[in-house]
Image (cartoon, helix red, strand yellow):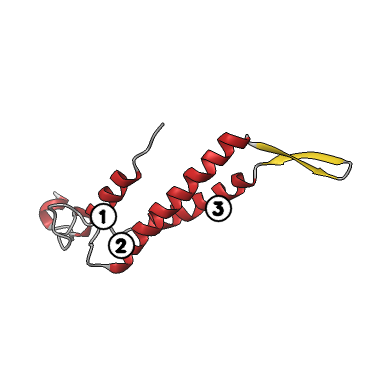
Amino acid sequence: MTFDIEKLHEQLMSKIDTDDLMEVKKVQRYIKLLEMDYLCDEAIERDGATVVIENGKQRFVKSHPSMNDKTKINSQLIAIEKTFNFISEGSPSSASTVEDEEPTDADLI
C-alpha cells in the first residue's frame, strides 16, 4: 500500500487556520512523525519483526527495535490528532446548536 504523504499534508493544511502558526507546526510535526513511522515499517519489513541477538555464547530473539519506536510514534500521532483545531466549512462557529437552546413552552407541548 502506498500512501501519499504530500496529499495528506495538503488536506490537513486546508482544514486548519494557516495563519495560526501553532496549528501549522502541528501539521508539520504530524507529517514528520508519519515519515518516521514509514521508515520504521521499511526497517521491519527488511529485517523482520524479530532480530537475533548474540552475546558471546548466548543467543536470543527479541522484537525489532523499530517495533517500540512505532508504538511511541503512534502515541504521539494520536496526541497530535486530538489537538487539531479544524475549521468548519460553511458553518458559522458561533451558531448555537439545538442542545444549547433553552426549551420554550412550545417545546413542552
Disc 3 element = helix
Q: Which residue is mark 2?
A: 24
Q: CA distance from mark 1 to mark 3?
A: 24 Å
Residue 18 appears in which quarter of the rendering? bottom left
- Quick check: marks 2 and 1 in contact, CB under 8 Å? yes
- Image coordinates for residue 72, horizontal then vertical, percent: 55, 53
Q: CA distance from mark 3 to mark 2?
A: 22 Å
The answer to whether 45 appears left or right of 108 in the picture is right
- Image coordinates for residue 27, horizontal then vertical, percent: 34, 57
Q: In front here: 81 or 98?
A: 81
Q: CA distance from mark 2 to mark 1?
A: 7 Å
**Residue lying farthest to the left in this orientation:** 106
Residue occupying the point 57% across, 50% down: 69
Earlier sequence position, callout 1 versus callout 3: 1
Disc 2 element = helix
Q: Which residue is mark 1?
A: 13
The answer to whether 13 appears left or right of 63 in the picture is left
Q: Amino acid at mark 1?
A: Met
Q: Which mark is residue 72?
A: 3
- Image coordinates for residue 5, horizontal then vertical, percent: 35, 45
Q: Residues within 10 Å of mark 1 (few under 14, many from 20)?
A: some
- Image coordinates for residue 50, horizontal then vertical, percent: 67, 37
Earlier sequence position, callout 3 versus callout 2: 2
Q: Amino acid at mark 2?
A: Val
